[in-house]
Image: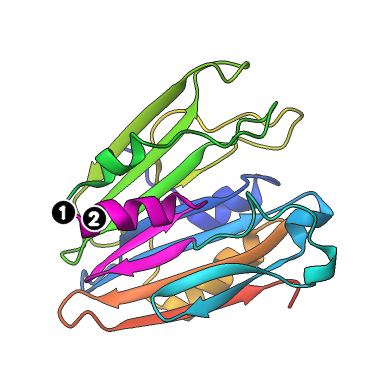
Amino acid sequence: MKTQELPQLLRKNPYPGRGVVLGATPDGRQSAALYFIMGRSANSRNRVFVQEPDGIRTQARDPEKMEDPSLVIYHPVRRVGRSLIVTNGDQTDTILEYLERGQTLEQALRSREFEPDSPNWTPRISGLLSPDGGYKLSILKSADEKGSACLRQFFEYPGQPGLGHFIHTYVQDGSPLPIFEGEPERVEIGQDMEDFARQVWESLNEENKISLFVQYTSLETGEACQLIFNKYE
């Protein structure tokens, strides 16, 4: 199976939309989580990532210019115990609620569907990173161009040194936007967080990128290190 370089994938795609990457460092001692957002409209671009005690949230850079917060303001990353939830919408909170009740990611996402933003029907992408380095990824997407039904796909991976999986909302730019197809892409994870994060940030399309979050977590101690990049801060 082919494993690709994440920065190279991003350089070839001007608009993957929002993306989640989960994986492990080459030495196998840390898990890795990345989340980025891109945007074409003024409303989407009027955002930054800010830290919260249990993760991060999106916030309007200029609240007076925020037109509709419903699909752009949310908590993309939240901790639950020593696990980490990473999503592209308010389904983060749904997953958290279910996990705290002893239920599963799959059960949580069966209660949700893709975003109601016709004609794009933006998929909801979600990930759950476990303390042992294993992880799950999911995508909820429209079954057709009318948004008449929801396809729910789930993928589960063991943590493997140097390997991650990348899932994103769109195949590329377009109108309407073509939604992600197939399985999450296999990508290499860098050993040095700061170097890897900067490579990813610099590879995102300069016009469309908004924010990037990166976290590396020690599998032994649970200690986490984070980086945030905001274009419009």
Note whether 180 is above or below 7 in the view shown.
above
Q: Is residue 114 left or right of residue 94?
A: right
At a point 58% along the width and 50% down the height, the residue shown is 18
The residue carrying mark 1 is: 102
Q: Are marks 2 and 1 in contact (CB under 8 Å)?
A: yes
Q: Is residue 31 left or right of residue 207?
A: left
Residue 125: % across, % down = 46, 44
Determine the image quadrant of residue 182: top left
The residue carrying mark 2 is: 99
**Disc 2 to disc 1, C-alpha distance:** 5 Å
Instruction: Tell whether position 100 is magenta.
Output: yes
Q: Quadrant of the C terminus?
A: bottom right
Residue 225 seen: yes
Q: Which residues are magenta?
A: 76-102
At a point 35% along the width and 31% down the height, the residue shown is 153
At a point 74% along the width and 32% down the height, the residue shown is 174
Q: Specify few, some or many for label 2: CA neighbours under 10 Å numbering under 14, 14-19, or 20 or more.
A: some
Q: Specify few, some or many for label 1: CA neighbours under 10 Å numbering under 14, 14-19, or 20 or more.
A: few
Residue type of the residue flagged with mark 1: Gly
Residue 134: % across, % down = 20, 56
Residue 31: % across, % down = 28, 68
Note whether 157 is above or below 121 in the view shown.
below
Residue 10: % across, % down = 60, 51
Residue type of the residue flagged with mark 2: Leu
Determine the image quadrant of residue 219: bottom left
Q: In terms of depth relative to the viewer, which is nearer, 64 or 118?
A: 64
Secondary structure under the numbered disc 1 in the rendered image: loop
Secondary structure under the numbered disc 2 in the rendered image: helix
Instruction: Tell whether position 97 is magenta.
Output: yes
Residue 165 seen: no
